[in-house]
Image (tube, grey):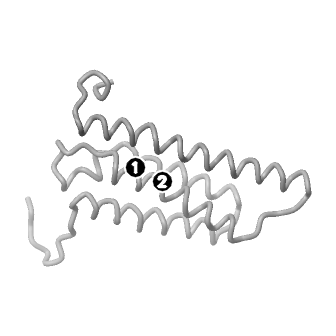
Amino acid sequence: MRTVAVGGRENLMSLYMTAGLPALFAAYQSAILLRVDSAIQTRRDFANWVWFANTVLETTLPAVAVAFISSSSIDPAYTPLANPAGLGFFLFISLSTLRLDPTLCRISGLTAAVSYLAAAAHLGWRPSIKGENRY
């Protein structure tokens, strides 16, 4: 609501990303649903690469939201943690178990970890390699 009431460039970009990302994802999921319905009617199964690509794409979505729907008012060290979109990882990793394929589950977890670290790096987070104390 703040985005609509206050206005401004950051709020407007946040509105576009908050509305556009789910709309794009819903269109993708609708296309997959149509393909699944078609496969069920013709009694055919999807190729493994389709499930692999779908799992990777779905598990990457929360990282895209973390990277691009974040407030600049939060300190960069905490921005990846303070974004509620990060909770989406739990949903998509859990959904990957519905195929009952251990390889897809591992790919989902690995994709979530790598994409989250990439989103955090995009937001300015850098790991402390030297072991320096930041307290």
The image shows residue 45, relative to residue 33, as above or below, that is: below
Marks 1 and 2, how far apart at CA = 6 Å
Q: Residue at x 25, y 57 (%)?
A: 123
The residue sitting at the top extreme is: 5
Discs 1, 2 touching: Cβ within 8 Å? yes
| Mark number, residue 65 | 1
Q: Position of residue 47 (x, y in %)?
A: 76, 69
**Residue displayed at 63% across by 72% down:** 103
Quadrant in which the C terminus appears: bottom left
Examine the rendered structure and indicate whether residue 3 appears above or below residue 58: above
Residue topped by disc 2: 61
Residue at 47% x, 45% y is 21
For mark 1, does the 10 Å Cα neighbourhood hold few (<14), some (14 to 19), or many (20 or more) residues? Answer: many
Badge 2 local density, few (<14 within 10 Å), some, or many (20+)? many
Q: Is 55 situated left or right of 37 in this image?
A: left
Horizontal and vertical percent position of residue 36: 78, 52
Where disc 2 sits, the SS reads: helix
Q: Position of residue 73 (x, y in %)?
A: 17, 42
Give the left or right position of residue 97, taking residue 114 as reference: right
Relative image position of residue 111 (x, y in whole percent): 48, 66
Q: Amino acid at mark 2?
A: Leu
